[in-house]
Image (spheres, rainbow, N blue to C red):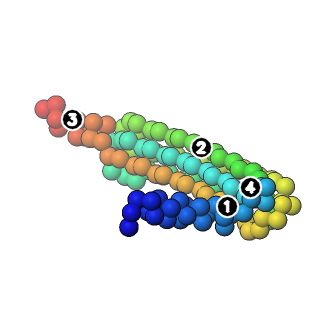
């Protein structure tokens, strides 16, 4: 195989997707369902081995047919200290609406993300620190 036939074969191969896709004027505009994202991070760094109470209550409301819109909510709660009891409670409520008349089917995409971190740190534990100072 010489270089001339190799280059023709490569050009022919690369032009096949262009031929299959049609003309640029025939491409329909993009549309998508509605999407909702709720991201929560709750962090407790403390001197107690008792589990922290970390709650993330999320309510996402959307119409049955929704398209062309998105929403994102974020939240961070951080506690650092020596308390034996820690309560981190988050209540999130949001709604979305969109045109719903562009032929896009399917429900709204809802993505609730809740990250809960509860870390024991002896530097915040009074009992541990008392034994160190002796």
Residue located beneath label 4 in the image: 24
Q: CA distance from mark 3 to mark 2?
A: 39 Å
**Among numbered discs 1 and 4, the one appearing first in the sequence:** 4
Q: Is residue 19 visible?
A: yes
Q: Would you say 18 lies left or right of 102 here?
A: left
On the rendered image, what quadrant is the N terminus found in?
bottom left
Q: Secondary structure at mark 4?
A: helix
**Among numbered discs 2 and 4, the one appearing first in the sequence:** 4
Residue located beneath label 2 in the image: 74
On the rendered image, what quadrant is the C terminus found in?
top left
- Marking on residue 109: 1
Q: Closer to us: mark 3 or mark 4?
A: 4
Residue drawn at the location 40% of the way across and 49% of the way down: 118
* Pointers 1 and 4 in contact (C-beta within 8 Å): no
Mark 2: give few (<14), some (14-19) or many (20+) Cα within 10 Å. few
Q: Closer to us: mark 3 or mark 1?
A: 1
- Marking on residue 130: 3
Q: Is residue 126 visible?
A: no
Q: Closer to us: mark 2 or mark 4?
A: 4
Q: CA distance from mark 1 to mark 4?
A: 29 Å
Q: Secondary structure at mark 2?
A: strand
Residue drawn at the location 57% of the way across and 42% of the way down: 75
């Amino acid at each position: 195989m010489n270089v001339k036939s190799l280059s023709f074969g490569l050009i022919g191969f690369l032009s096949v997707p262009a031929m299959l896709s049609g003309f640029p004027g025939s491409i329909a505009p993009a549309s998508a369902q509605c999407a909702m994202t709720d991201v929560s991070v709750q962090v407790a760094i403390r001197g107690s081995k008792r589990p922290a109470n970390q709650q993330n209550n999320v309510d996402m409301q959307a119409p049955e047919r929704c398209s062309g819109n998105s929403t994102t909510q974020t939240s961070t709660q951080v506690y650092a200290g020596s308390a034996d009891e820690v309560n981190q409670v988050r209540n999130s409520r949001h709604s979305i609406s969109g045109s719903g008349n562009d032929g896009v089917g399917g429900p709204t995409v809802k993505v609730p993300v809740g990250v809960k971190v509860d870390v024991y740190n002896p530097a915040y534990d009074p009992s541990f620190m008392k034994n160190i100072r002796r």
